[in-house]
Amino acid sequence: MLRPDPGLECGALKMPVDSFTMSPVHEKILAVCLAAGVAASAIASPACGPRRPTAPPGTARLADRLSRADVRESPFLGREPAADPALFPMESVPATEMGVGENGLGLKRKLNLGSTEVDILFAPPKSEYAVEVDIPENGALDFGTGIVRDARSEALRAARPGTDAGVDFIVLLEIGGRRRTLFERHLNLPALRESRTVNFSQNNIALPAGGRKGRIVLLTGGRGDLFSFWTNPVVYSRTRKRPNVILVSIDTLRADHVGAYGYDRATTPALDALAKDGALFLNTYASSPWTLPSHATLLTGTEAVHHKVRYEDERLDPGRATLADLMRSAGYFCGASTGGGFLSPAYGFSKGFSSYEMGQGDIAGPRLAEAAARAAISWLRANADKEFFLFLHTYQVHSPYYSPPPYDAMFTGPSAKWKKFDTVEDLGGKLAFFKALTEDERRNVVGLYDGEIRYTDDALIGPVNAELKRLGLYDGTFIVVLSDHGEEFYEHGSWGHSHNVYDESLKVPLVMKFPGSRPAGTKLAPAVRLTDVLPTILEEAGVPFDPAAFDGRSLRPVIDGRETADRPVTADVAENVLGFRTPFRIAVSSGRDKLIMNDMFKPEALAAFPAPPPVPPAVELYDLARDPGEKTNLARDPAKAQPARELISAASGLAKVLRTRDAAKSGLTKALEDQLRALGYIR
């Protein structure tokens, strides 16, 4: 048995630890904070962080390889332009992805175009970049060409009036001193409007026979004050050897409202069919009951104690490795279609994605799932010959529960009071989530929520699976479907999410369909976490990584039957998060026994609620095997004294660390504020 040192540290903060002998379960829970505390600081350190993946032979991301020596001609040579933002497009920043390499001139950038953020290699005329590559067998060059016109480019043009001839884009291949033109196109300067305008073209060209070294030369010609750029130029082999990966996050989807988990309504036929082709994890837990920190956990494989994103104005540290970052460095093409909001690039989630799209329409609209499917199918068709990682996210199931006919009445009946329900407007305001409804009204709300789920299943999951099969990609693709958190329907006296850490907020679906549909139809009972998804994907994709750099662990031992024990679970919600006036709450679980520690409501907070909140005790303990609804508090049960002490000690230590705030600020734009307002998060 391990006796912890009372001065043992978690990160930079000391954790007081009682000097009793810990059980193996307690050691595992405490290790969530302690063992990965070393890894958390190591992630930004090349010496001990995640091993940098190596792209497979034949894959060359030209922007990453570009050094100053490869810049043969540029308006920026001979000066240091990176410190002058006026020389670069608006809403563009230097790239921070792993492996981006030398970027002293600031040419490697992220460009946000409103609904889409893209990787660009900035190339104002006249520019000439020459990058050495190995030409692969069955090789191709994929790239985009574009011109952005904004206030900065107009200011430069006004200082030197001239013609609006546009930009010539030329791609050459140099081998043995000879040049061969592979591509040549002229793009006109886009029309001038109050907002930014873009003229863009996506291109893919075959390369000559492989097995030789050469240089890809990217040329732009025209006026030197035009903002022209290349997007993500990559040499790759069309002969795929590794599995493709699709990660789908259906925001706000409870596990117990999915057919594969035993729900008695036909909410998810397509997802249920996918589960029959793969593995269904019966007890999967999020580490937070709301979108932003939960996705930070999912996409970094770390808990909040390490990624430090727990409030609406916090964002991921730009130096932290993300799932897309690691996949990109290993040669995968990485794209995303999300609902924006708390998945906005402002929070750091676009890191690693060459294209990060947020154009699903009005974030509170009724057809978000269809828009997500259209974006996904379009992207799949354009990238079917590549090894890719696609991340899909939709707010469709999130309040307001608002789906198109016939889904708006599919589970409610003709006499239902509501065909659309908003947990802010229809309850009476942002802080009205403790308001009681009649049982008929509650069933009405649940029915609308279930209609949203069925619509998402029909409009997104089914069509994407069908398109994968049509393209011949289904068998070779690793598909992961999950949610970031659940939803409360007054089981413990409140609606929505972000308020509590009961299982209705934390227990989420997790379906993994592996290449070749192995192991088909498997149902796995051990408790697992969203932190475990990232290392599982990396392992399946063959991407090297350092397991010590993440809080999660690959689920392969669980799938193979080599691990049958529950994994320790931790979750929390910060005090007054999103301005909801609710207190800090934390949960720790050994799988069967779950402990919740609750701070008390502040008196001024209690006065703000139009309906009084239930006031839970400081400590709650539940036996989840016997009481999955968390109704009987066993905190004072003598038979549970030992697990209670162990869990309280672990929760207390984590709580001290989690109460600190030192994350980078997100910098909310007005557009992002409008999206969050539509979701009911801000006034």
Image (spheres, rainbow, N blue to C red):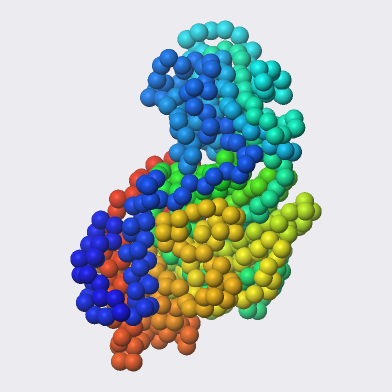
> Which residue does the image show at 20% across and 70% down from the upper left?
6
Q: Position of residue 350 (x, y in %)?
A: 51, 44
Q: In this rendered view, identify the residue nearer to me: 266 or 69.
A: 69
What residue sits 57% from the left and 7% below the top? 162
Q: Is residue 54 above or below residue 246?
A: above
Q: Quadrant of residue 186?
A: top right
Q: Is residue 19 visible?
A: yes
User: How many discs mark residues in the rendered view?
Assistant: 0
Task: Check the image and name the residue furthest to the right.
Answer: 470
Q: Position of residue 335 (x, y in %)?
A: 60, 45
Q: Nearer the viewer, residue 181 or 199?
A: 181
Between 300 and 500, the residue placed more toward the observer is 300
* Residue occupying the far bottom of the picture: 639
Above or below: residue 44 compared with residue 178? below
Tell me the residue at 42%/71% (across/down). Answer: 569
- One can see residue 402 in this view: no
Left or right position of 185 against 500: right
Give percent across and percent down for residue 159: 47, 10
Q: Quadrant of residue 195?
A: top right
